[in-house]
Every structure is written in structure tokens, then in C-alpha cells.
Image: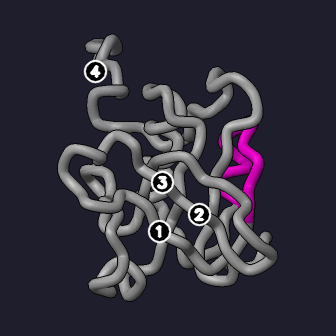
Amino acid sequence: MPDPGAHICVSEWRDIDAAPSVVSGQDKERVAQVLRSTDWATVVWTPTWILEDPETTVLTIGGSENLLVGECDDYSEDSWRLSQPQHEDTLDDPSAYLAKSQVVVFELTGDSDHLESPQRGLADFDRDDHSR
């Protein structure tokens, strides 16, 4: 399992599933969904305490208190620079410097065809067998 502060190159579900335990199962599912169904190739898991800092001016995605999307650059040995151009109209500075030791960066490295998680929803259960 990668250490906290991991940079995970994602080509299939098991890459996401191998994320550090600080990333919840629900957030892993959301990462897969974002990478599978949007144009974003990078999702960043960030601890809540960083997002609560008034100096942090980035926004999480719907359905998660810890996940961010945007353009993530390897700024220095110790930090990532996340910019969110999608929020330029609503935030003065839609970017943040995130400590590599505190966040998990998921970066899509192939196509998203293999990102289906083994999780199944209630709608997935087919009741074709009516022969009780």
C-alpha cells in the first residue's frame, strides 16, 4: 500500500483501491467516477484540516468533503500546486500549494475503461429469476 502523500498513477480500479487508508471507500468510488465520466485526469484527496484553513482557496467536488479536481503540477520537492481554472469566476485565486506528505494525488495514465469498481448498487441486481 502506498504511504500517505502518495502519487498514484491510475490505469485500473486496483490502483485506486490501493490508496492509503485515509482515503475512504466512498471517496475511492468517487475518484473512479470522476476519472471515468469527466475530462479531469487528476483528482486530489486532501485532509479536511487543510481545506478549513482560510488561506486555502480551492473547492471540493460535489459528493465529497475531501476531493478536489484541477490541474496539478509538481511544484517542488515538498509541494503540489493545484489550480482550478473552472473556478476562476468565483474565486479570487483558485489555486493552492498542497504538502505532498498530506495529500493523495490520483492521476489517470491510460483510458478509463478499467475503472469500474467491484461495488454494486441496488439497481445492478436483476430479478430475472422469478421461479421460486
Q: Position of residue 117 (x, y in %)?
A: 56, 39
Q: Secondary structure at mark 4?
A: loop
Residue 83: image tag: 3
Residue extent of the magenta highlight: 7-18
Neighbour class for label 4 at 10 Å: few (<14), some, many (≥20)?
A: few
Disc 2 secondary structure class: strand
The residue nearer to you, when weighing 34 against 99, is 99
Q: Which residue is mark 1?
A: 96
Please rate how many residues cluster around mark 3, counting C-alpha atoms within 10 Å: few if below 14, some from 14 to 19, many from 20.
many
Q: Amino acid at mark 1?
A: Ala
Q: Residue 129, located in which quarter of the rendered image?
A: top left
Residue 132's mark? 4
**Residue located 60% across and 53% down the image:** 72
Pick the front one: 27 or 87: 87
The answer to the question of whether label 1 and label 2 lie on touching residues, with beta carbons closer than 8 A, is yes
Q: Residue at x 42, y 56 (%)?
A: 68
Q: Earlier in the sequence, mark 1 or mark 2?
A: 2
Q: Which quadrant of the figure contains the C terminus?
A: top left
Distance (Cα) linking label 1 and label 3: 7 Å
**Could you tell me how far apart the alpha carbons at marks 2 and 3 are, in whole angstroms?**
6 Å
Between marks 1 and 2, how big is the CA–CA gap? 6 Å
- Say above or below: 65 vs 8: below
**Residue identifier under label 2:** 81
Is tag 1's residue or tag 3's residue first in the polypeptide sequence?
3
Q: Are marks 1 and 4 in contact (CB under 8 Å)?
A: no
- Identify the residue at the far front of this view: 92
Give the vertical position of 76 relative to 123 (above or below): below
